[in-house]
Amino acid sequence: MARDLLWLVLMITANFAKLIQLSCLAAVLVLGSCIDDSEQPDQSVAESSQEISAGDSDVSDVPGCPGVWNYIESFAGFVGTYARFSLAPEGEIARLSVLSLETQAETIFVSGFYQRSVRSGFWGQQQTGKYLAVPINPAIGSVIIFADSPGEDYVDGYAIIGERRSLITDRISQLCVAKFDSTSENGVATPFVLSRWF
């Protein structure tokens, strides 16, 4: 457990600049461009913001993730297989299987094992390893970090912008995620939806 916590701290520290950029992106996505320098906020934008904050939903109209999304407060119901139904750019997830979920005592993060297919050329590259995930946190937002099979070497990480849950099973049915990308202007690639396959 101490090794997992140390690994998470190292991964977060190594990606701190990316996480700060992600927090800025999330703030921009949530706040939008409501305020014009010369005038007061547009009334329709202000009203729609109040409607969103008044309900269970927290984020809406994210590029690549249409509709309304909830912040991920818990990873209960996370285990399962998720698929991306749009064409994945090179190096991004096309399919993700979350094989296990272990909550860490006295911490906010969860960990477990995964299998995934990442786009690499014409065929997908299969990868397995360990992940660490953090639910919504004011300092860094929600993130999932992937490591290799021994769980020692960082592979990549994704910001979790929001979730949708099944009303019947309360399992996570969709995730809106964006890969951390240091070459991108805002620190993350274009967000996309992962939908529960089974």
Image (spheres, helix red, strand yellow):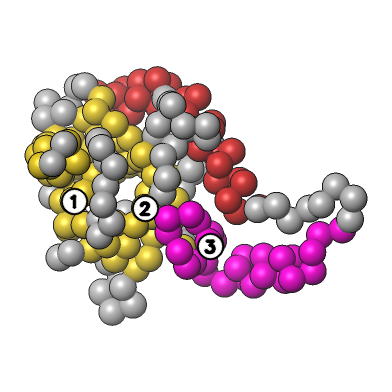
140 up-or-down from 83: above or below: above
Q: Is residue 41 magenta?
A: yes
Residue at the far bottom in the pictured view: 168
Q: Which residues are magenta?
A: 40-68
Numbered badge on residue 95: 1
- Which amino acid type corresponds to the residue marked 2 in the rendered image? Phe
- Which amino acid type corresponds to the residue marked 1 in the rendered image? Arg
Mark 2 and mark 1: Cα distance apart in space: 12 Å
Identify the image quadrant of the C terminus: bottom left
- Which circle's residue, 2 or 3, is located before the other in the chain? 3
**Residue at (34%, 57%) from the top-left corner?**
193
Would you say 24 lies left or right of 122 here?
A: right
Residue 22 picture location, percent across and down: 50, 37
Residue 37 picture location, percent across and down: 85, 47
Residue 33 picture location, percent across and down: 70, 52
Mark 1 and mark 3: Cα distance apart in space: 24 Å
**Residue at (55%, 46%) from the top-left corner?**
26
**Residue at (44%, 26%) from the top-left corner?**
183
- Which amino acid type corresponds to the residue marked 3 in the rendered image? Ser
Residue tagged 2: 192
Dot 1: what SS? Answer: strand
Numbered badge on residue 60: 3
Residue 38 picture location, percent across and down: 90, 50
Identify the image quadrant of the N terminus: top left
Residue at the far front in the pictured view: 122
